Image: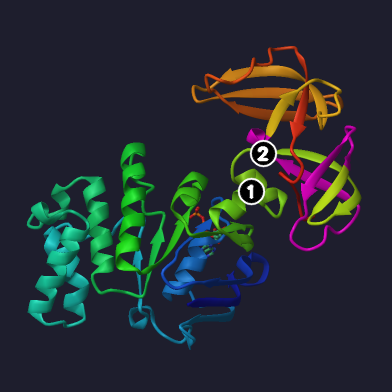
Amino acid sequence: MIEIDSVSKVFGSGATAFTALNDVSVTIRENEFFTLLGPSGCGKTTLLRTIAGFNAPSSGSVRLDGEDLVALPPYKRPVNTVFQNYALFPHMTVAENIGFGLDMLNRPKSEIKATVAEMLELVQMTPMADRRTSEISGGQQQRVALARALAPRPKVLLLDEPLSALDYKLRKGMQVELKRLQNETGITFVFVTHDQEEALSMSDRIAVMSNSRILQVGSPHDIYDHPAERFVAEFIGETNFLTGKIAGQEGETLRVALDVGGEIIARQPPGDPAGQAVTVAVRPEHAHFCAPDSAEATVTGEVSNVVYLGTDTHFHLVLSDGTPFALRLQNTPERAADAKLGDRVGIRVAPGVAQVLRD
Ligand code: ATP
């Protein structure tokens, strides 16, 4: 639905020129909850503003339903934005704020009234319709900002860290709300966040950004279980990195001789790994204890720390060459005896669970 093709954005010129988007291409599908995820300064907001029309790309094209958007001013695009600070009008009531965009579009009064009533229901703010927005809470202001942006029924809603001003509990509640609103309205949401948990829990697909580029696009499951490169594996969740050399190929998996000793069977990265030397990513919850130096053990190490976390226990291990390794076990009543501080332990990683990273 939204096709972003080789978009670059350079701010300034000469010695002070800064490339905020570097040859970014991505297609966002109709009706999807699409998230741009990455650390501060990686270019998320710049990409969002390019879709909205507040930024003109230095090169490349942005199309919506096949139509070139770049020449259209923001107000002519079937796109609306919810900003981080909500930007509500404090002297207007909740209902007036929600109807504001429709008023500007000169829609008939009866239609505005009906749409405002519908939007108030959608965001569960009907009882507060006549309050001024300066007299409602932060979470309620967030709902009004959403309702106002949804009221003209845009094809696309852009959301720039809309939950960052809310406290933890309210944010969790609004995450569920946003997902519900997107489902109910069928509007395509493009959501910006630097919070990996927020991205994993809400999105149909995620684009992971770093240094003005998109590194990987995929479902939350793809991104977490099949990170293509080190940055993605590190930014989303916790990961162990083991280095080694490719020793053979077996179907979709590679046999990697680890530098620390032993072998691991891990999934191939997208595309070919460039050389023989590779890094393998292993999630802490994908490793299990077994007898040290046994045939079962992928590697052997020593327990250097044990952290009890209620639902899980987190073990810090050190492999024989000094490489740190984290292992996480769920605390179920059936679980076999733990390893203790100082124990020598075997660590088993099942074949095909770990991921070889792209260089
Ligand atoms: P955050 O999560 O902190 O909002 P972001 O990923 O959204 O970060 P952007 O706001 O897109 O990052 O900014 C990307 C880079 O481009 C930053 O280094 C920023 O300083 C720079 N930048 C953004 N807007 C401008 C501008 N108008 N002029 C010059 N540089 C800019």
- Residue visible at 25% across and 55% down? 143
Give the residue type at disc 1. Answer: Asp
Q: Nearer the viewer, residue 116 or 330?
A: 330
Tell me: is circle 2 under 8 Å from ligand 1. Answer: no
SS class of the residue under badge 1?
Answer: helix
Q: Nearer the viewer, residue 304 or 14?
A: 304
Query: Is any part of residue 165 visible from this angle?
Result: yes
Name the quarter where the C terminus is drawn.
bottom right
Give the residue type at disc 2. Answer: Arg
For disc 2, the marked residue is: 283
Tell me if 173 is positioned left or right of 105 in this view: right
The image shows residue 239 at horizontal and vertical percentages of 67, 39
**Magenta span of residues:** 257-286
State the image quarter where residue 115 is shown: bottom left
For disc 1, the marked residue is: 225
Magenta span contains residue 298: no
Q: How many numbered discs?
A: 2
Tell me: is circle 1 under 8 Å from ligand 1. Answer: no
SS class of the residue under badge 2?
Answer: loop
Magenta span contains residue 272: yes
Q: Earlier in the sequence, mark 1 or mark 2?
A: 1
- Residue visible at 26% across and 59% down? 145
Query: Is any part of residue 54 visible from this angle?
Result: no
Marks 1 and 2 close (CB-CB < 8 Å): yes
Q: CA distance from mark 1 to mark 2?
A: 8 Å
Report the colour scheme. rainbow
- Residue visible at 87% across and 45% down? 256
The image shows residue 51 at horizontal and vertical percentages of 46, 73
The image shows residue 252 at horizontal and vertical percentages of 78, 56
Instruction: Mark 1: give few (<14), some (14-19) or many (20+) Cα within 10 Å.
Output: some
- Residue visible at 32% across and 74% down? 154
